[in-house]
Image (cartoon, rainbow, N blue to C red):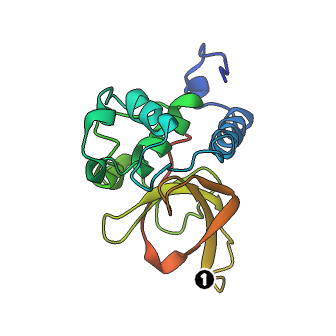
Amino acid sequence: MAVHYDLQRSSDLTPPDSVLEARRACILRATASQAYVVEKTGRNDHPQIYEYFRVAGFPNAKSWDWHGRAWCGVFVYWAAKECGCVLPKGNYAMVLTWQNLKSFRLLPGEIPKPADVVTYKPYSHVEYVNIWPPDPRKLFFYADGGNTGGSVKTQIMVLRRKADVKTVIRIVR
């Protein structure tokens, strides 16, 4: 989805809210479009998983030992690239790379939005926020991600505990 806006004035360097919301919606549509991706043998071996790795800069992932093909990070990267998000160079197969995006982290008190990225303690998983209840008494949120039980979980959203979140990263800005 290519979205264009006028960059003539310095105030135009930040895309308008409508562009940001369109990009967020694009990410959630992209994740939903992958609901058919289910590992064939539980060894990170669906052909689309290799495409996620290719987009993230790992064209030979199919030849790796399956233990080295955890794909949650490259799935998140793939959806971001599908929707025009710009990220710095890095190994997006590693959860630690996502956690180290310090300039992308939410500030204290900011409420996560759909398509924000969450990582978990300790360095174990990365996925997208789908619904984050702003009420602090609500201890759970819904997430969309890959590699959670061998498939893309999105239309049946994964319920996650807020307390397990290590970082929240806003890639749509």
> Does 23 sit above or below residue 65?
above
> Does 136 sit above or below residue 105?
below
The quarter of the image holding the C terminus is: top right
Place of residue 21 in the rendered image (x, y in percent of width and height, measured from the top left): 71, 41
Residue 74 or 166: which is nearer the viewer? 74
Residue located at (39% from left, 28% from top): 54
Residue located at (44% from left, 76% from top): 164
Residue located at (56% from left, 50% from top): 38
Does dot 1 land on a helix, a strand or a loop? loop
Q: Which residue is mark 1?
A: 139
The quarter of the image holding the N terminus is: top right
Residue 20 or 11: which is nearer the viewer? 20
Residue 53: quadrant of the picture: top left
As drawn, is 106 to the left or to the right of 82?
left
Place of residue 13 in the rendered image (x, y in percent of width and height, measured from the top left): 55, 26
> Does 162 sit above or below residue 100?
below
